[in-house]
Image (cartoon, rainbow, N blue to C red):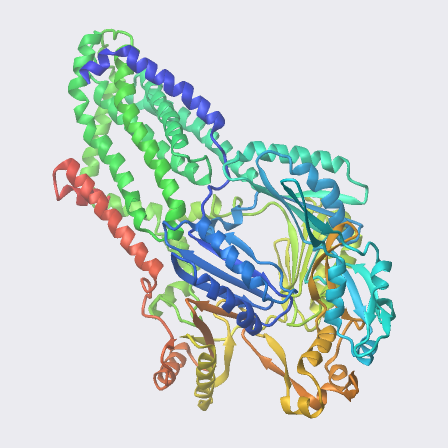
């Protein structure tokens, strides 16, 4: 240290370099909302119309899992199958080359797609991110709406907006969502098709062939080879209508126009999005990894302003999501915090140290520590984001601590001459090593056990730990170099110390008396302190005493929860007051934007058009009050119903129009039958109708490798509890994860004997029925009219009723028949979703018991104990008292917490050369 302090130019140039490079890095360091955090897992998604979960699981999910099992480094495969949707999540080892495994998976799925029906959409493969960061992955989203047909809106966006945006540097993709490609629709006259014994599917394949680019071989010219490609033959609807169709077993021909109508229509939608009553779509901007979020956001917003200026009058563009707004706010808050912290530190240091040079030396140490940490983070490949910023922000307080500790050890008794100062600092600096290293390494040591945390936690906690550790280590380096350097070479000669003033003596005397009083009242002060701060029991959420699986709280605690409003006021202290009146309570936690929200849950199987009619009723009653709302947005789906959001104009919050509409919306919701409706908003109690009341249910979870065996076990469990008159209902199709347990499916059971007796062909019968039942009989995409679209064949009938389908006379060759003669349609309940983990199925049986929870639990336990469980299956019911630690995440949390305590104890023991004293540090 003595030789280092004598080399003032070396230290000076070092800090000049840190300052210059730090400022340069600050200007080029990428700024992102969230870091690029991908778990070692991928998710494969398939969509297939309204296909039932059982068929989806059998035809798609199982096949995808079979292909996934061929991959190397796979540790876990989980799947969720719902109506028309299949999702398979594949988890790999931590150090597996996931990108290469994804390439292999794409090859396997490409082979699989050749054997799947054409109506199944191509698979999407996405990397999984932690759930805590999923809602922050979206970068920028705009909504485009207007008085224009959905397919026209889509074509306008693709032609006039998207090409202008793709050239922006740092932009990975501009995705258009909410409107699907149009469809080339061929509507068959079923009577004519059956009369001439035609196959609609073969006709669709002929049309598809004439609308496809086809290879015609190649020609060679010298050393070059040129492929020959024939463009699509049909250019217009008239060309398609003139397609000649040969009649089976005859030389006669018909043209397609004789028994079908051809048109370009919107694709049969499952979802609808409208803004202010007009069709809408979303334009989503996807950022490239590592691109600077601020710069890219400014370029995107500028480009969209130019686009908006050129829009037709009937179109409207609105920014709905800008993830950089929160990031900008965080940077503004960080700057504001730095300013206030600097001012506060300045006055506090002046007050207690009473040296004018102290705040400048200490703030210099903090500034250089931050700049050096930015340089190190940049060299390590990290960006500035909400996680690394959190680490730096947490470390700021300790940067000041380290600087103050070192300064206070070196500044007292600082000699006048520089040579004497070097000797003084060399002698005294050793006394500050233990407290500085102790506080720094114990903080760093807490984060070391995170290396043993679960992947979902470690993947985004490690960047936090790295940022904090780098900043603290840099602060130690700066504190032990900058402060001695500044005290030796940047501090002027010290004048003679004046005699201690009378005020100073009075302050010292008062402090000594206060310390003596504190020593005498050492057992009273903690009680007073706890009483003032309060016991934060109010932060505990009230347990659900009627929950299906019970509660971890013993029954005697219910006395407190029943009277907590009166008790918390006495024992909550300042903590409760802070919680209610600052950040956690009013007014900070409230959203200043007033809204009215309407949620409509439709019965399963409700056509989208029927849900849309109800939504249009709300759009109709809001029309007289439209000027009082900034906008209103409707999202309609066959899967869940509809959600409508009305955003109140701030100028009308204290006027009557929004509240008049709110009353009319509640009245309309109360009058809407067969649908569950909720109308809420404006900080006024709303209404909810049709959702049903609460009930005390008990859930039994089943696991097994055979779907049929698990179903039989569930049916056995359904039969056994019904022997008790207290059991009101047993649902074997309940879902542990979803509230919608009303899934119903129609099953057409054909009799093979009757089919053969009527001289019919099963395949052709089903092919004819598909035109009546499925509006999405697509054979893939074709190119027509200069754009890609789906080719769909269906019946000219818009709706098919069970009675008409079963009893209508059909013709197959020379045979007349109806479906009721060869089969029947049965309605059955089914699973809303099928879950499987490593090929093991999960199923939930829900029992509604009329009695208190304990009686119901004991009864079901007795039923479970007497139930015979097949080999490979198991039954889970209930959980232990205070069931914490029963799952992997809880056990891992306990393990990491104990490792953190052990790490701190070891570090403090090594610094203090004591086993006993670190215990006091940990307790503190």
Residue 832 shows in the view: no
Q: Which residue is most to the front?
A: 222
Q: Quadrant of residue 699?
A: bottom left
Compared with 132, 720 (above or below) is below
Compared with 29, 421 (above or below) is above
Relative to residue 513, is residue 772 drawn left or right? Answer: right
> In the rendered view of the protein, which quadrant contains the C terminus?
top left
> In the rendered view of the protein, which quadrant contains the N terminus?
top left
Residue found 72% across the figure and 65% down from its top: 205
714 or 232, which lies in front? 232
Residue 165 shows in the view: yes
Relative to residue 621, is residue 343 drawn left or right? Answer: left
Residue found 21% across the figure and 38% down from its top: 518
Residue found 32% across the figure and 28% down from its top: 474
Relative to residue 179, is residue 847 drawn left or right? Answer: left
Residue 554 locus on image (x, y percent): 33, 68
51 or 572, which lies in front? 51
Q: Quadrant of residue 888?
A: bottom left
């Amino acid at each position: 240290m003595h030789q280092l302090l004598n080399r003032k130019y070396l230290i000076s140039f070092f800090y000049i370099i840190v300052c210059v490079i730090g400022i340069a890095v600050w200007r080029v360091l990428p700024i992102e909302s969230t870091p690029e955090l991908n778990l070692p897992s991928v998710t494969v998604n398939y969509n297939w119309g309204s296909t039932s979960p059982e068929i989806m699981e059998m035809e798609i999910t199982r096949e995808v899992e079979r292909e996934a099992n061929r991959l190397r480094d796979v540790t876990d495969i989980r799947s969720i199958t719902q109506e028309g949707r299949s999702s398979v999540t594949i988890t790999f080892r931590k150090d597996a080359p996931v990108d290469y495994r994804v390439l292999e998976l794409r090859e396997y799925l490409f082979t699989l797609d050749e054997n799947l029906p054409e109506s199944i959409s191509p698979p999407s493969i996405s990397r999984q991110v932690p759930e805590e960061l999923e809602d922050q992955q979206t970068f920028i989203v705009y909504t485009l709406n207007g008085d224009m047909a959905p397919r026209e809106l889509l074509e306008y966006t693709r032609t006039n907006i998207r090409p202008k945006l793709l050239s922006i540097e740092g932009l990975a993709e501009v995705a258009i969502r909410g409107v699907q490609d149009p469809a080339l629709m061929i509507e068959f006259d079923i009577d004519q098709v059956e009369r001439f014994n035609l196959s609609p599917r073969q006709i669709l394949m002929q049309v598809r062939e004439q609308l496809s680019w086809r290879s015609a071989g190649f020609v060679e010219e010298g050393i070059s080879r040129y492929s020959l490609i024939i463009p699509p033959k049909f250019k217009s609807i008239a060309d398609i209508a003139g397609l000649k169709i040969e009649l089976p077993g005859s030389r006669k021909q018909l043209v397609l126009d004789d028994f079908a109508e051809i048109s370009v229509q919107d694709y049969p939608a499952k979802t609808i999005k409208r803004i202010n009553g007009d069709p809408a779509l979303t334009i989503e901007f996807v950022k490239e990894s590592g691109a600077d979020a601020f710069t890219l956001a400014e370029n995107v917003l500028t480009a969209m302003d130019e686009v908006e200026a050129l829009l037709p009058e009937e179109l409207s563009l609105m920014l709905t999501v800008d993830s950089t707004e929160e990031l900008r706010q965080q940077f503004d808050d960080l700057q504001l915090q730095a300013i206030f912290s600097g001012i506060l530190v300045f006055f506090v240091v002046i007050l207690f140290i009473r040296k004018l040079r102290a705040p400048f030396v200490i703030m210099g140490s903090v500034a250089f520590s931050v700049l050096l940490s930015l340089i190190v983070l940049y060299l390590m490949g990290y960006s500035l984001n909400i996680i690394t910023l959190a680490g730096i922000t947490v470390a700021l307080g300790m940067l000041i601590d380290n600087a103050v500790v070192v300064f206070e050890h070196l500044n007292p008794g600082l000699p006048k001459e520089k040579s004497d100062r070097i000797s003084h600092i060399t002698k005294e600096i050793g006394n500050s090593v233990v407290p500085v290293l102790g506080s720094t390494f114990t903080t760093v040591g807490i984060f070391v056990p995170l290396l043993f945390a679960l992947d979902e936690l470690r993947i985004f906690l490690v960047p936090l730990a790295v940022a904090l550790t780098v900043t603290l280590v840099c602060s130690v380096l700066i504190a032990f170099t900058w402060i001695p350097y500044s005290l030796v070479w940047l501090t002027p000669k010290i004048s003679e110390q004046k005699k201690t003033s009378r005020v100073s003596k009075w302050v010292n005397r008062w402090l000594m008396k206060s310390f003596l009083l504190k020593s005498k009242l050492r057992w009273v002060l903690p009680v007073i302190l706890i009483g003032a701060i309060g016991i934060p029991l109010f932060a505990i959420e009230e347990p659900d005493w009627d929950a299906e699986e019970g509660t971890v709280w013993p029954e005697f605690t219910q006395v407190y929860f029943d009277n907590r409003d009166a008790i918390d006021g006495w024992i909550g202290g300042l903590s409760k007051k802070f919680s209610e009146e600052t950040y956690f309570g009013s007014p900070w936690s409230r959203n200043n934007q007033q809204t009215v929200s309407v949620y409509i849950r439709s019965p399963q199987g409700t056509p989208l058009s029927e849900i849309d009619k109800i939504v249009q009723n709300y759009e109709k009653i809001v029309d007289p009050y439209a000027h009082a709302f900034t906008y209103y947005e409707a999202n309609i789906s066959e899967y869940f119903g509809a959600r409508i959001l009305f955003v109140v104009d701030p100028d009308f919050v204290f006027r009557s129009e929004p509240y008049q509409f709110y009353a009319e919306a509640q009245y309309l919701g109360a009058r809407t039958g067969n649908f569950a409706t909720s109308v809420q908003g404006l900080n006024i109690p709303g209404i909810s109708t049709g959702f049903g009341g609460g009930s005390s249910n008990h859930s039994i979870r089943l696991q097994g490798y055979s779907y049929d065996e698990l179903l039989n076990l569930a049916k056995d469990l359904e039969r056994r509890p019904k022997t008790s008159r207290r059991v009101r209902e047993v649902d074997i199709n309940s879902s542990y994860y979803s509230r919608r347990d009303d899934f119903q499916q129609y099953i057409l059971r054909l009799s093979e004997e009757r089919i053969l007796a009527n001289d019919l062909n099963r395949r052709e019968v089903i092919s004819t029925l598909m035109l009546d039942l499925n509006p999405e009989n697509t054979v893939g995409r074709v190119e027509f009219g200069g754009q890609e679209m789906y080719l769909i064949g269906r019946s000219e009938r818009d709706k098919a009723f069970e009675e008409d389908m079963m009893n209508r006379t059909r013709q197959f060759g020379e045979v007349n028949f109806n479906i009721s003669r060869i089969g029947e349609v049965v309605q059955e309940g089914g699973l809303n979703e099928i879950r499987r983990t490593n090929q093991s199925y999960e199923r939930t049986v829900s029992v509604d018991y009329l009695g208190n929870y304990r009686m119901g639990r004991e009864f079901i336990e007795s039923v479970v104990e007497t139930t015979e469980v097949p080999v490979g299956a198991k039954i889970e019911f209930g959980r232990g008292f205070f069931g914490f630690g029963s799952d992997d995440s809880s056990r891992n949390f306990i393990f990491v917490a104990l490792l953190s305590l052990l790490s701190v104890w070891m570090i403090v023991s090594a610094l203090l050369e004591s086993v006993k004293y670190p215990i006091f540090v940990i307790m503190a």
